[in-house]
């Protein structure tokens, strides 16, 4: 696999970083995951805007302009054997010659690493039957709008779902739904689609925003608001969204059936519009 590390395209086996890299020592960095369909970046602009927000959040100067990022990403995509990809892009504060919590001087260059893995579509069983989720108290920090590589809490929370044979852990703060360990959450009652408000406690998903945009374009009503756990568990439909999962129906939470236990009609409708959007992107009708 060809990866990008600090200005060079090279085989993964030749990509090395210092053990003093602050990403390795402190988790001092941010990342993006960007889907690629038929060789085309999906919502690349929005992902690069969010990268800038994350870099601002950790006070790290963006090492590349948007144009440079796009050029690097397009070249990396061209060097991959697959057309549908999940790009992982990480920027850390770089490697100093010592371990010190305070930021290093300006002479230290950030470390930029990018790789691309094949993006596989969801297995048929997932979209036919939906997935199960669990809920857990959200014990992460207060800056979840920064897409930080420091993901220990998210990993531990997700693993609890994995241990129970479920796909995701839905995080709850003070009785309110926040997001998944690595996804955003939607709740449908009747035809109304609800999703939690943006804020510091959650990551504003690019997929989430696209779902809202697609729904608006089809005159399907959506609202961004607080959602209580009872509303989640009593909903007709629950979905999770992310760049790698797209939009998946959740048909059971904490062992309790959601709606009639099958992917609901609003999801069926939305996902067909989502598929159309992807087709238009691949056809070059939208960028
Ligand atoms: N994660 N919330 C969290 C905590 C996430 O980690 C993610 C995605 C999302 C959804 O964001 P988007 O729609 O922009 O992918 C929400 C990626 C996929 C990951 O960490 O691999």
Image (spheres, rainbow, N blue to C red):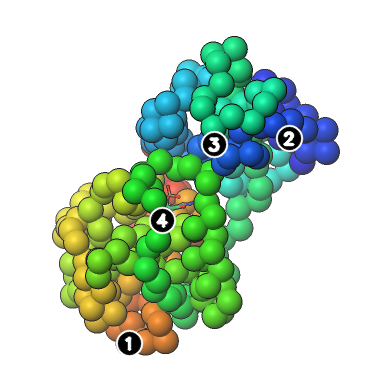
Q: Position of residue 264 (x, y in %)?
A: 33, 76
* Above or below 229: residue 270: above
First in sequence, mark 2 or 4: give its number: 2
The mark closer to the camera, 2 or 1, is: 2
- Residue ID for mark 3: 28
Instruction: Determine the CA span between mark 2 and mark 1.
Output: 51 Å
- Would you call the spot at circle 4 few (<14 residues within 10 Å), some (14-19), or many (20 or more)? some
Question: Which image quarter: residue 22?
Answer: top right
Residue 196 can be seen in this image: yes
Q: Nearer the viewer, residue 247 or 132?
A: 132
Instruction: Determine the CA span between mark 3 and mark 1.
Output: 44 Å
- Would you call the spot at circle 3 few (<14 residues within 10 Å), some (14-19), or many (20 or more)? many
- Residue ID for mark 4: 140
- Say whether residue 155 is left or right of residue 144: right
- Residue ID for mark 1: 260
Give SS at disc 1: loop
Tag 2 and tag 1, C-beta contact below 8 Å: no
Instruction: Determine the CA span between mark 2 and mark 4.
Output: 26 Å
Q: Position of residue 267 (x, y in %)?
A: 33, 68
The mark closer to the camera, 3 or 1, is: 3
Question: Which image quarter: residue 43?
Answer: top left
Tag 1 and tag 4, C-beta contact below 8 Å: no
Give SS at disc 4: loop
First in sequence, mark 3 or 2: give its number: 2
Tag 2 and tag 4, C-beta contact below 8 Å: no
First in sequence, mark 2 or 1: give its number: 2
- Residue ID for mark 2: 19
Q: Position of residue 18 (x, y in %)?
A: 74, 30
């Amino acid at each position: 696999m060809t990866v990008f590390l600090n200005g060079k395209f090279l085989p993964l086996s030749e990509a090395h970083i210092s053990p003093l890299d602050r990403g390795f020592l402190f988790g001092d960095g941010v990342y993006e995951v960007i889907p690629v369909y038929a060789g085309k970046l999906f919502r690349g602009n929005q992902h690069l805007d969010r990268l800038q927000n994350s870099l601002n959040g950790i006070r790290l100067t963006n090492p590349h302009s948007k144009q440079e990022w796009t050029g690097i990403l397009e070249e990396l995509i061209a060097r991959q054997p697959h057309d549908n990809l999940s790009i992982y892009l990480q920027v850390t504060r770089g490697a100093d010659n010592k371990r010190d919590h305070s930021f290093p001087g300006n002479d230290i260059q950030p470390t930029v690493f990018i790789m691309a893995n094949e993006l596989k579509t969801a297995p048929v069983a997932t979209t036919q039957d939906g997935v199960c989720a669990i809920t857990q108290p959200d014990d992460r920090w207060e800056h979840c709008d920064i897409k930080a590589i420091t993901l220990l809490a998210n990993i531990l929370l997700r693993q609890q779902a994995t241990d129970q044979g479920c796909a995701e852990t839905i995080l709850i703060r003070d009785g309110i739904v926040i997001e998944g360990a690595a996804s955003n959450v939607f709740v449908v009652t009747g035809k109304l689609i609800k999703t939690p408000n943006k804020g510091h406690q959650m990551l504003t998903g690019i997929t989430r925003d696209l779902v809202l945009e697609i729904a608006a374009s089809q005159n399907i009503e959506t609202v961004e608001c607080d959602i209580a756990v009872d509303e989640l568990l009593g909903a007709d439909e629950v979905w999770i969204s992310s760049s790698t999962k797209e939009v998946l129906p959740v048909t059971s939470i904490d062992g309790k059936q959601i709606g009639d236990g099958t992917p609901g009609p609003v999801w069926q409708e939305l996902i067909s519009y989502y598929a159309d959007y992807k087709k238009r992107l691949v056809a070059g009708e939208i960028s």
